[in-house]
Amino acid sequence: MTQQTVAAGRESLADGERQRQRWMHALAMAETDVLAGAWQQWAPKPEVEAIRGPEAGLVMVRSRVDAGGAKFNLGEATVTRATVRLHGEPLAADVLGTAYVLGTDLEHARLAAIFDGLLADDAQRQRVLSEVVTPLEEQQLARDEARRADSRSTLVDFFTVSREHE
């Protein structure tokens, strides 16, 4: 293999990783009832078999001083994980889906894992992206923008306050 082929392979792998990170972020940040509604409307549904969990546990959150210095333990966070196997119609082959979400919502982790499994199936990926992931990302973007606008409304210009007292 040439260096160009290896580099192209790394780029495509990196693109695939970025895409998966994007959709897993949308699924992890979604409201459970939104995911439940999307799954309830999904047809035809494949068979879902629990492989691991859903189960809640603790993870140690680590950080760095000044984002690049010495590592230190920041604290613990509760995380729920689930792994499922999807098989049967409409899938061509068995697929696995895995999800980790902050908190103890077992159903959220299970539903996120189901949609991750559907995203692993080439024939189902575009449907999941258009019907589930993209609307979730749009909702999250609108929610984030509303929070930013709310934060901007409380901005205080301390230079102005200081000038008033001169």
Image (cartoon, helix red, strand yellow):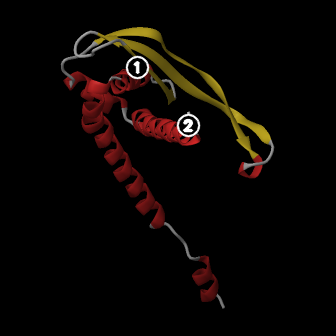
Closest to the camera, between mark 1 and mark 2, is 2
Figure quadrant of residue 62: top right
Say which amino acid is labelled 2. Answer: Val
Marks 1 and 2, the one that precedes in the sequence? 2
On screen, residue 54 versus residue 125, left or right, reads right
The label on residue 110 is: 1
Figure quadrant of residue 147: bottom left
Say which amino acid is labelled 1. Answer: Arg
Which residue is at a point 59% across and 81% down the rendered structure image?
161
Which of the pair 87/30 is nearer the observer?
87
Q: Where the C terminus falls, by quadrant?
A: bottom right
Which residue is at a point 41% across and 14% down the rendered structure image?
84
Q: Which residue is mark 2?
A: 6
Disc 1 from disc 2: Cα separation: 36 Å
Numbered disc 2: secondary structure: helix
Evaluate if marks 1 and 2 touch, with contact meaning CB atoms under 8 Å apart: no
Numbered disc 1: secondary structure: helix
Q: Where the N terminus falls, by quadrant?
A: top right
The label on residue 36 is: none
